[in-house]
Amino acid sequence: MTLLNHVSKHVEYLARKGRTLLTNDLRFHQMRLEKVSGRPGNIRQPVTLSEKICHRLVFDRNPLFTLLADKLNVRHYVHANTALVNTVPLLGVYRQVKEINFATLPDQFVLKCNHDSGSTQICTDKRTFDATNALRRLHFASKRNMYYTTREWQYKNIVPMILCEQYIAPPRLAATRALPEMLRLHCFHGILRVIEADFTDSHGREFINVYDRDWQPLPCQMEYPNTPHPVPAPALLGKAIIASQQLAHSLDYCRVDLMLHDEGIYFSEITLSPRRGKLTITPMEWDTQLGNLWQWRAETAHPHESAQLGYAIKPASSA
């Protein structure tokens, strides 16, 4: 990121922050949803998974969501709720970029902010790592409140910190017996129902296969094409499913992202609003089918939701 790009992005951020005075969250997500799907969405009375995620972003202010979105504090939640996954070892926690001492870091590491998405800086070789550019990006990210850019409320009240984690090399499709580099486990009311499995081949091409909990392929795609050939279920699948349900037990919907490696399972994140509620699913009717898995009942309304809308999200059942 050059200085000019830095200034440009800062001006863009200030403009988006100012836009909150003119466009409320409901209108913001309504417009974005229509732009992505090509059809008007109904956030007040949602049916599709995208609409229900947007409804949560607009109307649900559960303080637990802030903890889960915080990449630092969520570690405590993970350790308290499951013993089946590891968190990536922390090498350092910093309030400002000037506190980072690269001389004390190993040859490979990952730097990221705890309060956003997209600030990650990966170093696989300190000799070629552009530390100046990484620090500039992290400084910009640390001063930005992601809520004003994406209107994802769960990020609004997180205290910004910078994390340094151990680098965990992702597996590759051709070199690791087709081990997925990430499992994204969609849990509805504490039960795993849909799995996205991410793969990257030796040429850098990305694939996503979509499965049910029994590793049977579902006839839909999410963002990327399916792998050219069938992929066997990973040995750690059962353990990953149990862990995801333990982490999702108190939520009506979330996506639990887990990294699989030969030595075990690493926690990545709990995502409350995949794609910010603007999912790219083909065929489109699968957005509705997935939405049907998220049950809504008026008698179990959140207090603020029942007052505004007359219905609410059903609480998750226990795993």
Image (spheres, grey):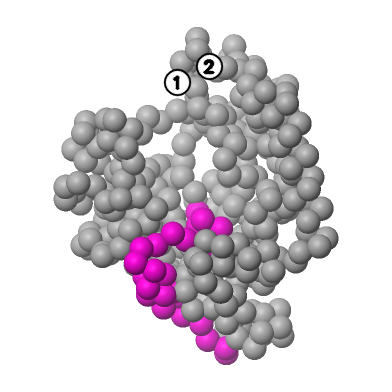
- Residue 197 is one of the magenta-drawn residues: no
The residue range painted magenta reads 270-299
Q: Callout 1: helix, strand or loop?
A: loop
Q: Where is residue 34 in the image (x, y as percent from the top left)?
A: 56, 67
For the point 51% across and 82% down, the residue is 296
- The amino acid type of the residue labelled 2 equals Phe
Q: Residue at x 73, y 34 (%)?
A: 8
Q: Mark 2 and mark 1: span between their CA atoms?
A: 8 Å
100 relative to 196, above or below: above
Decide: is 292 above or below 205. below
184 above or below 172? Answer: below
Position of 79 compared to 135: left or right?
left
The quadrant of the picture occupied by the N terminus is top right
Q: How many marks?
A: 2
Q: Which quarter of the figure has residue 180?
A: top left
- From this viewpoint, is residue 86 visible? yes
Secondary structure under the numbered disc 2 in the rendered image: loop
Q: Which amino acid does label 1 sit on?
A: Thr
Would residue 292 be counted in the magenta stretch? yes
- The structure residue drawn at horizontal position 44% and vertical position 59%, both measured from the top left corner, is 280
Q: Residue at x 54, y 53 (%)?
A: 77
Residue toward you, 173 or 86: 173
Which residue has dot 2 on it? 129
Query: Does label 2 or label 1 sit earlier along the sequence?
Result: 1
Decide if residue 195 is on the left or right side of residue 305: left
Residue 191 picture location, percent across and down: 38, 69
Q: In this view, does 65 lie to the left or right of 194?
A: right
Please say if the residues under marks 2 and 1 sit with CB atoms less than 8 Å apart.
Answer: yes
Whether residue 273 is visible, yes or no, is: no
Q: Is residue 318 above or below residue 167?
A: below
**Nearest the camera: 28 or 156?**
28
Which residue, given by chain and number where applicable, does mark 1 sit on? 124
